[in-house]
Amino acid sequence: MKNKKIMIIIIIIIIILIFCVIYTVRSFRNPSGKHVLIIQDNQIIYNLDLETAEDQEIRINYQNHYNMIKIQNHEICISEADCPDQTCIRTGVLKSETLPIVCLPHKLIIRYAEEGESP
Amino acid sequence: MKLRKLTELALLTALALIIFVIELRIPNMIPIQGVKLGLANIITVYAVFQYKPSETAMLVACRIILGAMFSGNMSALLYSSAGAFFCLIGMILISRFLDLKYIWICSILGAMLHNTGQILVAVLVMQSTAVFAYLPVLILSGSIAGAFTGLCAQLVIRRMQNTTP
């Protein structure tokens, strides 16, 4: 009886892990579109087409803090921020279609637009 | 007896905090929010199997609050406490019918629940479901870290049983 329960738990864990592996591998695919949304506090503040956007830096203020977003060679990344963890900078260039660049302290998300979302 | 238990729990909390602070010094190699080795959870897993649920909850609560103060990252308090809440409930439930041989399974499950709780809070804070995309990646990395901490806890518990009367 005891062994059966353990086996069930192990099987559930393995199934979850398999799903996660598939999903993670899929998220490394190249994105289909080039439309990027910059979202803060659940509001789209920028809607960019990386194909046509020229190299620039965008400063986004959040209360007394800021994020610098850099667009270069049709790629987008956060170049500077004054949040304590700096994870958004180390995430680097936005590559994956599903995994966004997130700055949790400043409630900032940079992600590719889904189909139907782009103008 | 009660005093003895209090001392033990305080000692464990101190140990967990020391591990936590040392881990802060190790640079995080994977640049994804929430990916972490979580070595301090060795103590959590140990406590789940050696103490009553209420005592374990007290230990973890102390560690999280003091840990947030020590790291100076109070905004992380919300995420880690939600994660720990889910993780503890899951681990305490499952530890009732697990042998000491299978502690690492309990730890993996705890890690998965921890990451799920964190992501849920992140979704609530950001009010955006885009953050959900990180869940599979976090669960994957969390399970690896959880298996490691669980194995460590298993070793510790086995040694402790040999020495304490």
Image (cartoon, helix red, strand yellow):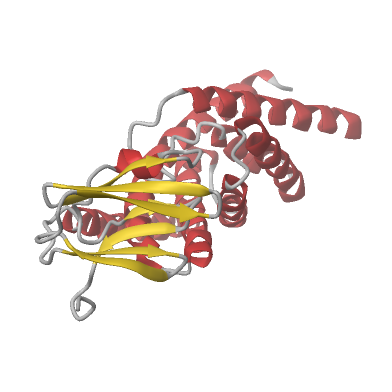
- Above or below: residue B149 compared with residue A45: above
| Quarter of the image where one finds residue A26 | bottom left
Q: Could you say where residue B88 lies in the image, as x and y percent from the top left? A: 61, 51
Could you say where residue B34 lies in the image, as x and y percent from the top left?
44, 45
Please tell me in which quadrant of the rendered image residue B15 appears.
Answer: top right
Left or right, residue A40 beside residue B22: left
Regarding residue B152, the answer to whether it shows in the image is yes
| Residue B30 position in % (x across, y down) | 33, 37
Residue drawn where x is 37% and y is 45% of the image: A88
Q: Nearer the viewer, residue A39 or B20?
A: A39
Residue B28: which quarter of the image? top left
Single out the residue that lies furthest toward the top: B163
**Location of the C terminus of chain B (image quadrant):** top right
Please give the name of the residue rendered at 25% of the width and 57% of the height, measured from the top-left corner: A18
Report whether residue B1 is seen: no
Is residue B109 shown left or right of residue B48?
A: left
- Please name whichever residue, B132 or B109, is drawn nearer the observer in this view of the structure: B132
Front residue of B151/B82: it is B82
For the N terminus of chain B, the quadrant is: top right
Give the side of residue A26 with respect to residue B35, left or right. left
